[in-house]
Amino acid sequence: MKYALRVFRKEFVDSARERRALASALLFGPLFGPVLFAVTVGLSVNLGMDESSEPVEIPVVGADRAGNLVAHLGQRLIEVDAERFGDADALRAAVRGGDEKVGLLIDEGFGDALRDGAPARLWIVVDQSNASAQVPRQRLRSAIGEYGSTIGMQRLQLRGIDPHLARPFAVLTDDVSTPSGRSVILLGMMTYFLLFAMLLGGLQVAIDTTAGERERGSLEPLLTLPVRRRDLVVGKVATAIVFMAVSLALAIAAFATAVQFMPLAKIGMSTNLSLRVCVLIFTAVAPFAVLGAGLMTFVASFTKSFREAQTYTSIAMTVPPLPVLFSIFNPVQPSLPLMPVPSLSQHLLVTSVMKGQAIEPTHVLVSAVCTIAIGALCTWGAVRRFRSEKLLV
Amino acid sequence: MIEIRGLEKRFGKVSALVGASFTARDGTITGLLGPNGAGKSTALRILCTVLRPDAGTAAVDGIDAMEDPIGVRARIGVLPHNANLYANLTARENISYYAALQGLDDAAGTAATQRVIDTLQIGDIADRRTKGFSQGQRIRVGLARALVHDPRTLILDEPTNGLDVMATRALRDVIRERRDAGCCVLLSSHVMQEVAALCDRIVILSQGAVVAAGTPDEIRAATGRDDLEDAFVHAIGAGAGH
């Protein structure tokens, strides 16, 4: 291992002087994630934001037939615009064309029907395919429903009947998610970006020290030195690991900084990226650097040139974060049988940490050991490749 | 002392070596001469343990390159064909790295590095990064790197390729100096004049086999030609014939 350390020392200095390697480790990797993440979160926040506190204006045809309803809507911050459209067809056309998100059409016989105790008809004019209209649509529907049930209860009371008889169930929602738990759906993507930033950080080094060394013609003299190929490869992989770990630390720091500026509070989310949480996240994810560095070095050792290596490692880079993507769309709970799966286990641990939940030390251990073992297997593959004369010819 | 016996090597359908045998003694500069594609580099690469032969043996000081590659590598200093330096490191760092991987500790490595920098007279460029070095500067640093552990055996593949006259002369001086120190020097070249000017013994390789070997005089006598160049052409022709 003395020689592996010497190889590491040289490769580290060499890579640290290589602008390309340095830029991808210190700049692109750590910044790419948080920037993309901020954009994604920004979009999601705007889509899902609870707009009930904001007044909304809705065009109504026949508002004069339902004065009390209009007044009720006004209390719910739904402003009625009775002037804009003269007839139902004009309103429908406007909603269909997307000029209006939602409209309300009150039947000519609305007032009479209400007085007679018959169902008074009104139409909410919607375009179901317009996703952005969902919020005002829901608000209008629930405000009208609320007003309707008030009238219904008054009618029952007038007839001497307990209105509660008409409401056999009281269905309430008990939301047990914590504010930081709610943000996890969005922040779950963070693991993906962290893994990506980390892999990107060591990619140039992995290529430089294998395919790059071969392409530049410095590999053959190196192989004539009395050093075991194992030590050469371990030194090179170790360099990539260090670069990846630095990238990871920077990416976490960038995230911790970026979330301060994200409008998460608007959607009732809070983020918990204290120093302690950041350290825990680093501890959970860092073992993946061994796998990443081993895999990249292994793949790069099969290529003959820098460009070829870039092509293949770029493809290989998309594979490790796949379990994370899978679990974002098919959420699973952390459990011991899942911990041996690299990237998925890191994702689950990071998610737990950010939810503010306690994580099992055994989970961390199993995750780390299995991930490192797979990384060691990749490194062993690279050693085998270095022992083969195919590396040169 | 280098001993090559019955070396065979194929790359796919191409036979690079078909039973080559020769010896290079200590205190002697042995030139491996042959046209392009004769198998010179392949033979040297097998000797340096970076290629494995399909048949035959290669040994340095009695140590078999296949059985104990690490032992062989510790005894040889190698300047491969088109070998390159680490562009981000200074010449001194390039040499120190090789000293470290040859097993020298930091203090010994630093001293050995300085010694070869002085020997090869590259003090003026020693602390510059090697990016942008001329071919002559690269060869000299490469040679310093190969000599840093003071090997008894020196293997140089086309060392004078791309060198100007002054650089070539300087290189020859270093090679002769190693010979005089009792080292075994084996170098390859496709330039007959180069080999004639420098080598004590010549091994002529053609189409993967040795077609003539000995001192320049012996080769002239064996081929019946007075002129070494004629002898070379004659020997190669004999090789091409069979």
Image (cartoon, grey):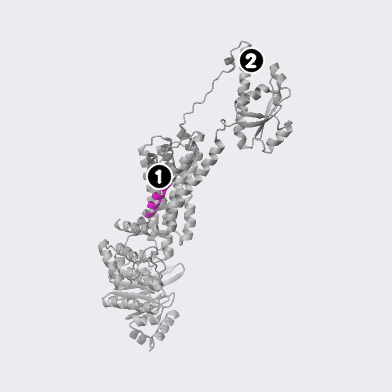
Bounds of the magenta span? A239-251
The answer to whether A293 is drawn above or below residue B49 in the figure is above
Characterize the magenta stretch by its predominant secondary structure: helix
Q: Which residue is mark 2?
A: A155
Q: Which residue is mark 1?
A: A285
For the residue pair A163 and A292, the one nearer the viewer reads as A163
The answer to whether residue A345 shows anywhere in this view is: yes
For the residue pair A213 and B111, the one nearer the viewer reads as B111
Residue A146 belongs to magenta span: no
> Which three-letter amino acid code belongs to the residue tagged 1?
Val
The answer to whether B58 is drawn above or below residue B235 in the figure is above
Q: Give the alpha-carbon distance from disc 1 to disc 2, as whole Å.
A: 63 Å
What element does badge 2 sit on? helix
Provide the chain ID for the residue under circle 2: A
Task: Please provide percent x and percent y for residue B102.
Answer: 29, 64
Instruction: Tell me if mark 2 has few (under 14), some (14-19) or many (20+) residues whose alpha carbon lies within 10 angstroms of its own.
Output: some
Q: Which quarter of the image is occupied by the C terminus of chain B?
A: bottom left
Provide the chain ID for the residue under circle 1: A
Marks 1 and 2 in Cβ contact (< 8 Å): no
The answer to whether A6 is drawn above or below residue B163 in the figure is above
Write down the quadrant of residue B57 in the picture: bottom left
Task: Please provide percent x and percent y for residue A14.
Answer: 38, 60
Task: Please provide percent x and percent y for residue A162.
Answer: 58, 13
